[in-house]
Image (cartoon, rainbow, N blue to C red):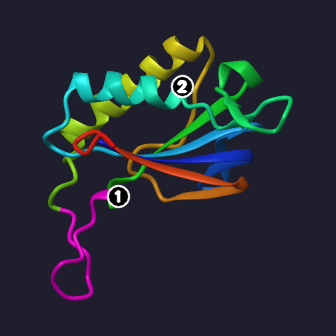
Amino acid sequence: MRAVIQRVTTASCIVAGNTTGAIDLGFLVLLGIEDADTQEDLEWLAGKIVNMRVFGDEEDLMNKALADVDGNILLISQFTLFASTKKGNRPGFTRAARPEKAIPLYEAMIKQLSLLLNKEIQTGIFGADMKISLVNDGPVTITIDTKNKE
């Protein structure tokens, strides 16, 4: 799994003119799922997301996690995070998991994040043409790959 985590002051997702998810302070998380991903990857990544300390404390140091600031998550499925640009100029997406594998893991990630954060997770719609708006705070943008744990 790959995640692009953006600390935001606000973020929203619109599909066909309707808002499917919106948050104020928190994380916009773009989530890519590949065929090799497992429940273990999901649990490790969810823990990293929820416990990531990138919110300012009283001295404006990045020491607080989502729960410390009553933050929220907007989770968006993003298969293009597994784009291959090795050949030519048109990306290939063969590493991205097919919907029959990706949808259950995406839904499980929603449940896991909700359980860990103890609140509802806002989402887009898997496979839809989504319009994402955000105000990146900082900017703070962090990428995590479960197959390359740095």
Circle nearer the N terminus (1, 2): 2
The amino acid sitting under disc 1 is Leu
Write the start and end of the magenta stretch as one range.
81-93
Circles 1 and 2: CB distance less than 8 Å? no
Compared with residue 42, is residue 140 higher up or lower down, i.e. above or below? below
Left or right, 119 with respect to 126, comes to right
The amino acid sitting under disc 2 is Val
- Look at 26% across and 87% down and name the residue there: 89
Residue under circle 1? 81
Residue 138 position, x and y percent, is 73, 54
Residue under circle 2? 50
- Look at 61% across and 31% down and name the residue there: 53
Residue 129 position, x and y percent, is 48, 59
The quarter of the picture where the C terminus appears is top left
Judging depth in this view, the residue of 143 and 31 nearest the camera is 143
Q: In which quarter of the image is residue 37?
A: top left
Residue 100 badge: none
Judging depth in this view, the residue of 21 and 39 nearest the camera is 39
- Look at 50% across and 12% down and name the residue there: 115
The local secondary structure at tag 2 comes to helix
Count of marks overlaid on the render: 2
The quarter of the picture where the N terminus appears is top left
Please state which of the two labelled residues, at mark 1 or mark 2, is closer to the viewer: 2
The local secondary structure at tag 1 comes to helix
Q: Residues within 10 Å of mark 2 (few under 14, many from 20)?
A: many
Judging depth in this view, the residue of 113 and 106 nearest the camera is 113
Compared with residue 68, is residue 106 higher up or lower down, i.e. above or below? below
Residue 54 position, x and y percent, is 64, 38
Residue 70 position, x and y percent, is 75, 22
Marks 1 and 2, how far apart in space? Answer: 20 Å
